[in-house]
Each structure stands twice: as C-alpha cells, then as structure tokens.
Image: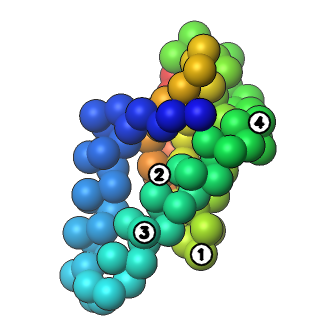
Amino acid sequence: MPVEKKTQAQADLLEIADYIAADNPEAAERFLDAAEATFDFIASLPGVGRTLPFQSPVAQNMQAWRVDGFERYLIVYRVVEQCIDIVRVLHTSRDFPAIFE
C-alpha cells in the first residue's frame, strides 16, 4: 500500500530529528531511516498497529506502531481506502488524549 505522510507528521519527523541531532547527529539520521523503514513495514501489514482507544471523531480508526529501534516514538496512522495516512509521529511521553480529542 502507498504511504502518505500528512503535513503534521512531516513536521513531527523534522522536530524529532532536530531534537536528537542536538546530542547525536548520527542518531538523528538513524531515526529518520528507521521511521521510513517502519512506514514500509506498516504498508506491508496495515493492521499491525494497536488501535488508539480515544472516542474523539478525530481519532477514529487510528492505529499506532513503534519506530523500529526508537521504541519511545510512535507512528500514528490510519488506513484509508488503498493508502496508509501517517498522521503523526510522537514521543510516548506526549499527552495523546489532549492531542487527539
């Protein structure tokens, strides 16, 4: 399935990479590579993620899966028709209910 990164997800990736790069530029590159590889994995198995338990209409049918090798970062995505929409990429410490409700 094709993968489409929403604008906010692209911004999330850059923000996370910048944060990681402040201490370790090589780790930031590894994070971006791992995120892309994880997007491909999700595209091959779209149902792999855990469904987010939020009741908000904004969060309906969203799933989450960890970035391989960076387990504190979650890819939040939605399967729509014949595409995977990457909605956000977030650190697990974030307030998910506030973000999605």
| Amino acid under disc 1 | Gly
Residue at far top of view: 57
Residue for badge 2: 90
| Amino acid under disc 2 | Leu
| Amino acid under disc 3 | Asp
Closer-to-camera residue (30/97): 30
Find numbered disc 1 in the image and state the secondary structure of the residue it sits on: loop
Can residue 98 be seen?
Answer: no
Residue for badge 3: 33
Q: What is the distance, in whole Å, between disc 1 and disc 3 at their CAs?
A: 10 Å
Closer-to-camera residue (11/45): 45
Camera-nearest label, 2 or 4 = 4
Camera-nearest label, 1 or 3 = 3
Residue 93 sits above or below residue 78 on the image: below
Badge number at residue 57: none
| Amino acid under disc 4 | Gly
Q: Earlier in the sequence, mark 1 or mark 3?
A: 3
Label 1: few (<14), some or many (≥20) within 10 Å? few
Q: What is the distance, in whole Å, between disc 3 and disc 4 at their CAs?
A: 22 Å
Q: Earlier in the sequence, mark 2 or mark 4?
A: 4
Q: Earlier in the sequence, mark 3 or mark 4?
A: 3
Badge number at residue 47: 4
Can residue 22 be seen?
Answer: yes
The reply, left or right, for residue 52 in relation to residue 92 is: right
Find numbered disc 2 in the image and state the secondary structure of the residue it sits on: strand
Q: Earlier in the sequence, mark 4 or mark 1?
A: 4
